[in-house]
Amino acid sequence: MYKYFLKRFIDFSIALIVIFLASPVILIVFLLLFIANDGKAFFVQARPGKNGKIFKILKFKTMNDKSDENGLLLPDAERLTKIGSFVRSTSLDELPQLFNVIIGDMSLIGPRPLLVEYLPLYNKIQMKRHDVRPGITGWAQVNGRNSLSWSEKFNLDVEYVNNLTFGLDLKIVLLTIKKVFIREGINSSTSSTMEKFKGN
């Protein structure tokens, strides 16, 4: 009942309310990033959703597009702006995904939507992470986020899919609030973002 009907209703209702209440913050962050990133406040990228269906994820852009003498983008850590670092550490960069939730591409809670190029690299068990809508936060995020290895992250994603209940979602919400306040697990041990998944 919850998984197939109530979850989507709760997602839509809460996302709508949060967008309304957070609209001043969303506007301020938009203006600051618009200035810091030369007019580019949003990051838009194709991601696989439920059943592998491709959608466009919307996030605040925390890195600029500076490149080296060969035209290649600089490492993530060098492109992360000061305001972008703050926005990311406070998870404000995730706010625009509330619009993805309204549309129905995402859920408030679920496995994080990763890159499309990873799809052929998953094994059969890991592909189960696409049995539900991807989320803004999830079981892997509250259990380590970018400090986890890929195998640990995928195991937690599949564990969530296999045990999806209202109680688990509520627990993830409460743990997410805690994680945001202590700013834990934002970066991996070797990069400002998670290293790319290269297969099993």
Image (cartoon, rainbow, N blue to C red):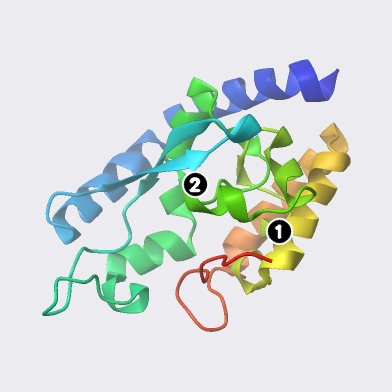
Q: Tell me the amino acid under the disc marked 2.
A: Val
Residue on which disc 1 sits? 142
Q: Give the camera-side residue of 51 and 171.
A: 51
Instruction: In the rendered view, tell whether residue 115 sits above or below residue 24.
Output: below
Q: Quadrant of residue 166?
A: top right
Q: Give the camera-side residue of 54 and 120.
A: 120
User: Which callout, 1 or 2, points to the residue nearer the camera?
Assistant: 2
Residue 18 visible in the snapshot: no
Residue on which disc 2 sits? 116
55 vs 200, left or right, is: left
Tell me what residue is drawn at x 18 percent, y 58 percent: 37
Instruction: In the rendered view, tell whether residue 173 sits above or below residue 73.
Output: above
**Helix, strand or loop under label 1:** helix
Instruction: In the rendered view, tell whether residue 151 sits above or below residue 91.
Output: below
Q: Tell me the amino acid under the disc marked 1.
A: Val
Tell me what residue is drawn at x 61 percent, y 70 percent: 185
Q: Quadrant of residue 173?
A: top right
Tell me what residue is drawn at x 33 percent, y 60 percent: 62
